[in-house]
Amino acid sequence: MSEAQARHSVFDGVSAAARAFVERDHQLFIGGEWVAARGGETLSVYEPASGECMCEVPAGQGGDVDRAVNAAREAFEGGEWSRARPVERERLLLRLADAIEANADELAEIESLDQGKSVGMARNLDLTMAVDFVRYMAGWATKIDGRTVEPSVPYLPDQQFTGWTRKEPVGVVGAIVPWNFPILMAVWKVVPAIATGCTVVLKPAEETPLSALRLAELAASVGLPAGVFNVVTGDGPGAGAALSGHPGIDKVAFTGSTEVGKLIGKAAMDNMTRVSLELGGKSPVIVLDDMDPQAAAAGAAQAIFLNHGQVCTAGSRLYVPNREYDAVVEGLAGIAGGMRLGSGRDPEAQMGPLVSKAQQERVAAYIDSGRQQGARVAAGGGCPDRGFFVEPTILADANHQMRVVREEIFGPVLTVMPYQDLDEVARLANDTPYGLGASIWSNDLARVHRLIPKIRAGTVWVNCHNVLDPALPLGGFKQSGIGRELGREVVDLYTETKTVLMSI
Ligand code: NAI
Ligand code: MG
């Protein structure tokens, strides 16, 4: 196939609007304007089902990040934004939610072309969540408040004081996001920043930069003042490191690998920049013995295969009671073996490609290491020729010495292990450096309640997995991160507390 034909087939069935956006001459969005990257270098953007290059985006570098941080600083310190009342921030965000919703079909196509996930999932999950989260945060803009305190000041008994606290915006935020849920991750950081009165520079992942650029365009179209929200596309070591280590930002918000999260945390500490990190996971799925094996297999399949396993909370370690073990593995092998792979625009496909060639190779290498360390491949294990696909894979008879059990794979690969009793499974569930999510599958209320406090993880689901809501906090124990996004907790990540003490 010629390059032109391949490019054409990438866009089969895609709307003219989405295609026109993808094929546009992309630029950085800084200070309310589209500008070229100073160095003039670009990054290629690939469509994962075909592996074809769709377009180029600017590879921003340190100088571009400087410019964006300066624009964000200017907008924060003076001008329209610093004078905007909470109700104006609320209304802007409500308009932004309406604009995302009105363009959700096109955004879902862009996300599918860029990331590989199905248009249907992007529309129903990523965009629905994004719109609702923007509205949820719009509500917070007018509800940020402090406390009044009556101080005693024990060593000044003859004087009278009054005291109170104020929540003030933390300042200029650097947001660095990954490629698994591109627009949702962008919204989770940019929108709390806007709601609290901060300004922000967003660096999307190099694999999936497109929806962030469209989001910036929509934000400008609803009247967000220049410089409040800037986007610098580029890679991690270039634009990402320049942003996270920039002395001009007050806070860095990151989602991605634990490895890079540690680098970012260290760079932030040099400038005492506030930092929140949402990092990797190796979340356990714990089936108790009152569960029907088929229902357990169906639940576990959903926990690992959502977004093709590219989910920070993916249920990648399954623990099954000894006597149900064979039946559950068999059920899972049936489900995984029957899944149809296809492009994000193929309505019959049940799973799409991984995001990139690098991620495909990484996941394939993990499957090999699992085989070599003695896991049994009960389903899948291979990679089709075209595109960045990996078959849904079940690695049975795994154990805690294996890399596939200890390390985050971030692909459609489930490890399965038997267990004897509740104490053993609690110990195994916690035998990991991570602590992001976990699920317990049972209707035995007493045992579920006994298990919940024992699990060291930021979220414990019961009879579901990977289910998120704007009002419930999300974040990690241990090496899964620092801080909680979503819920009322997110307001604390984007504000400083100021104490006022007045002698009266
Ligand atoms: P990554 O952590 O390198 O990339 C995430 C973001 O960080 C991207 O925007 C990237 O450009 C940026 N980045 C990379 N290096 C940076 C640096 N030195 N300074 C500042 N920013 C930097 O993740 P990658 O390499 O794409 O994936 C590797 C593994 O990370 C995956 O296999 C998965 O295990 C894990 N991961 C976890 C995610 C999560 O949601 N928890 C999301 C993405 C990856
Ligand atoms: Mg990386």
Image (cartoon, rainbow, N blue to C red):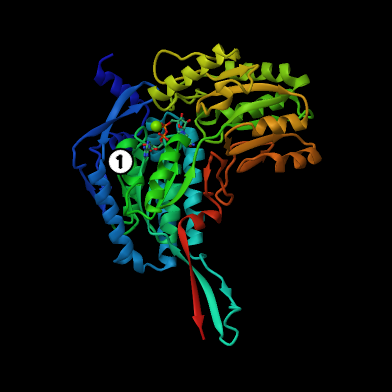
Ligand 2 location (quadrant): top left
Inspect the image, locate mark 1, and give the three-letter code of the amino acid beneath it. Answer: Ala
Q: Is residue 323 left or right of residue 30?
A: right
**Ligand 1 under 8 Å from disc 1 Cβ:** yes
Decide: is 409 above or below 224. above
Q: Is residue 235 visible?
A: no
Q: Is residue 239 left or right of residue 393?
A: left
Q: Position of residue 121 (x, y in %)?
A: 50, 34
Q: Is residue 313 left or right of residue 418?
A: left
Q: Residues within 10 Å of mark 1 (few under 14, many from 20)?
A: many
Q: Is residue 413 visible?
A: yes
Q: Position of residue 14 (x, y in %)?
A: 36, 31
Q: Position of residue 91 (x, y in %)?
A: 42, 62
Q: Quadrant of the N terminus?
A: top left
> Residue at left 49%, top 13%?
382
Decide: is 362 above or below 234. above
> Residue at left 77%, top 24%?
420
Q: Is residue 464 left or right of residue 4?
A: right
Number of numbered discs on residues: 1
Q: Which residue is mark 1?
A: 239
> Residue at left 48%, top 26%?
347
Query: Which residue occupies the foreground of this view, 305 or 338?
Result: 305
Q: Secondary structure at mark 1?
A: helix
| Residue 413 picture quarter | top right
